Image (cartoon, rainbow, N blue to C red):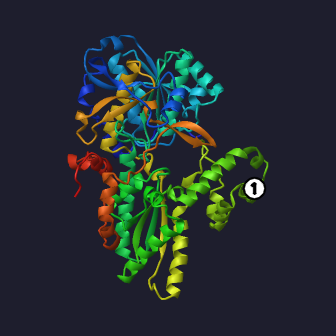
């Protein structure tokens, strides 16, 4: 018998959170008709200016935009149709971006309509969409996940895909497209904006900065949404483990955290929990450390704590660590190029072993020897299918287990020579997907709603090739500033799939920045003493200093002193 549809269960927290009304910045409270765009000076890309300008002749050099008070009723007179697409991995707050976008459009003109493309950018190419109404949106406000319209990692870049996207946007009579995504997704948004301009199509394309990794930021984009919530979720889990380790006192926990291209998550979680060690990939790269040197540093810590009778501890590892180790970075880069250049030949081989030997034959001897020296499991993981951008799927490489195996070998050598007498029992973890779809923190609920509402204002002002920008984030939400940043302003040229391509530059942990300085100042104490912090779950209700506070990273970047 067919299973009948049942009413979806809703938790008590969901019911309470549905009643939460995000706080809009004061400048937006009277609606899109009460703000006008103030243009700044012409901009240029962060690097490779001549090349980026040549690729984006129609969208390069746009001015920064700040919204200020003013009568803009004319921009709201005509009813518009706007499309929205969620691109890339999930991040807490995506639904509130859509809610803010919908509310901003409806506030401007009740006849305005919002449509969601289903399953990510492929929905644009395949013309799969649904209208998002206030009645539909009601069940998704302040919730985690992207399940209202789902997401995907398709890139719209071939002539056929771009033509199909253009034709479908025109067929649906859309006036604007809002792309919610990370650096790659917003690079794609810039490509689409440029293509439409070249084709003489008057449809605006606007981006919204999303990624829990925290690597889409600069002076104008102070934080990507989802980072605050995800790091709070991971910090709760790490804090729970620290409480356990301080109780049992017999295990070393190695915890790998998301962050393929930057170590922001590991750094922020370290600030919130104060583990015995946190590896920062950018520091490893700057010091040109080998894998052996990284291991030796951890071995020294473990031996020192063992001497003090402490055969336990917690180590945080960013998932992208392996790419920051220069010798491994060089190997992965060579593998990326080799796999891209020999894609057809590799497709004809049946087994992973055959593919591995084929690729090894294409690598320089130094790199082939390095790959052969790795544990077979890690070497195999380096050979797995690439992500849609042609990169090694670093999240599948169990770096924490690699470190543990190498540490065990080194400690056994020290024990044999009488230099180590402790016990090394380990438990490994990977906290990744646990953080991507959590219910957004109050900060992220406010931030994403403002980003979406602001994107509606950008669309109504016919701004194309811009990223929604909400600034002054360490202030109260009502005091935030809003506007738009040209997507080309954040571009540089990088090597992808063996070719030079324009992409939004990733923001790495700055070793001269205040957050890293704060880590350096405190990590020696964290290493030897057990000064663990237990953040607990995300607090949605309570005093402002508990519910509304944003990340330690952002506070330090904005000049606040942290005790």
Within the image, what quadrant is residue 100 found in? Answer: top left
How many dots with numbers?
1
Visible residue check, residue 108: yes
Query: Relative to residue 304, is residue 178 depicted above or below?
Result: above
Quadrant of image for the C terminus:
bottom left
Query: Relative to residue 381, is residue 69 depicted above or below?
Result: above
Residue under the image location 46 percent in, 26 percent down = 60
| Percent coordinates x, y for residue 198 in the rendering | 55, 19
Q: Residues within 10 Å of mark 1 (few under 14, many from 20)?
A: some
Within the image, what quadrant is residue 440 found in? Answer: top left
Residue extending farthest bottom: 418
Visible residue check, residue 139: no
**Residue tagged by mark 1?**
358
Of residue 53 and residue 258, the one placed in the foreground of this image is 53
| Percent coordinates x, y for residue 204 in the rendering | 46, 21
Residue under the image location 30 percent in, 42 percent down = 443
Which secondary structure lies at badge 1?
A: helix
Query: Relative to residue 517, is residue 149 depicted above or below?
Result: above
Of residue 354 and residue 7, the one placed in the foreground of this image is 354
| Percent coordinates x, y for residue 382 in the rendering | 63, 56
Residue under the image location 52 percent in, 70 percent down = 404
Residue extending farthest front: 50
Quadrant of image for the N terminus:
top right
| Residue 159 in the figure: left or right of residue 12 | right
| Percent coordinates x, y for residue 417 in the rendering | 51, 88
| Residue 509 in the figure: left or right of residue 291 | left
């Amino acid at each position: 018998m067919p299973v009948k549809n049942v009413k979806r269960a809703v938790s008590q927290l969901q019911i309470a959170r549905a009643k939460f009304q995000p706080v809009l910045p004061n400048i937006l409270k009277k609606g899109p008709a009460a703000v006008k765009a103030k243009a700044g000076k012409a901009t240029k890309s962060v690097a490779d200016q001549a090349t980026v300008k040549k690729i984006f002749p129609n969208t390069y050099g746009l001015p920064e935009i700040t919204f200020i008070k003013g009568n803009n009723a004319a921009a709201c007179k005509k009813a518009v149709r706007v499309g929205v697409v969620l691109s890339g991995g999930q991040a807490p707050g995506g639904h509130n971006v859509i809610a803010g976008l919908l509310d901003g459009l409806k506030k401007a003109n009740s006849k305005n309509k919002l449509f969601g493309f289903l399953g990510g950018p492929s929905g644009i190419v395949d013309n799969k969409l649904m209208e998002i109404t206030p009645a539909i949106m009601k069940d998704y406000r302040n919730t985690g996940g992207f399940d209202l319209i789902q997401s995907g990692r398709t890139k719209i870049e071939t002539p056929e895909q771009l033509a199909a996207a253009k034709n479908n946007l025109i067929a649906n009579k859309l006036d604007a497209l809002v792309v919610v995504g990370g650096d790659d997704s917003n690079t794609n948004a810039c490509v689409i904006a440029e293509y439409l301009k070249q084709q003489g199509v008057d449809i605006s394309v606007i981006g919204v900065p999303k990624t829990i990794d925290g690597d889409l930021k600069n002076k104008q984009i102070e934080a990507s949404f989802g980072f605050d919530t995800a790091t709070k979720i991971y910090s709760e889990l790490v804090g729970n483990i620290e409480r356990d380790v301080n109780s049992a006192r017999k295990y070393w926990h190695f915890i790998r955290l998301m962050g393929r291209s930057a170590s922001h998550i590991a750094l922020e979680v370290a600030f919130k929990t104060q583990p015995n060690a946190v590896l920062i990939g950018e520091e490893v790269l700057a010091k040109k450390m080998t894998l052996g040197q990284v291991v030796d540093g951890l071995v020294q810590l473990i031996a020192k704590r063992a001497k003090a009778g402490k055969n336990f501890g917690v180590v945080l590892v960013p998932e992208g660590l392996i790419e920051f180790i220069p010798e491994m970075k060089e190997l992965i880069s060579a593998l990326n190029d080799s796999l891209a250049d020999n894609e057809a030949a590799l497709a004809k081989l049946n087994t992973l072993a055959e593919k591995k030997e084929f690729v090894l034959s294409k690598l320089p001897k130094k790199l082939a020897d390095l790959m052969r020296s790795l544990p077979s499991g890690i070497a195999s993981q380096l050979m797995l299918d690439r992500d849609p951008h042609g990169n090694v799927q670093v999240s599948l490489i169990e770096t924490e287990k690699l470190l543990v195996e190498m540490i065990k070998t080194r400690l056994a050598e020290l024990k044999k020579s009488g230099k180590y007498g402790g016990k090394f029992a380990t438990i490994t973890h990977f906290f990744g997907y646990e953080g991507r779809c959590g219910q957004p923190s109050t900060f992220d609920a406010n931030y994403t709603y403002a980003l979406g509402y602001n994107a509606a204002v950008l669309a109504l002002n016919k701004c194309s090739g811009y990223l929604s920008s909400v600034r002054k984030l360490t202030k109260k939400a009502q005091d935030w500033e809003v506007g738009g940043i040209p997507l080309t302003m954040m571009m540089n040229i990088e090597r992808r799939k063996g070719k030079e391509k324009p992409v939004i530059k990733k923001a790495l942990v700055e070793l001269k920045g205040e957050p890293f300085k704060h880590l350096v100042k405190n990590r020696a104490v964290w290493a030897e003493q057990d000064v663990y912090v237990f953040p607990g779950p995300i607090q949605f209700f309570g005093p402002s200093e508990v519910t509304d506070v944003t990340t330690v990273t952002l506070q330090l970047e904005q000049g606040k002193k942290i005790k």
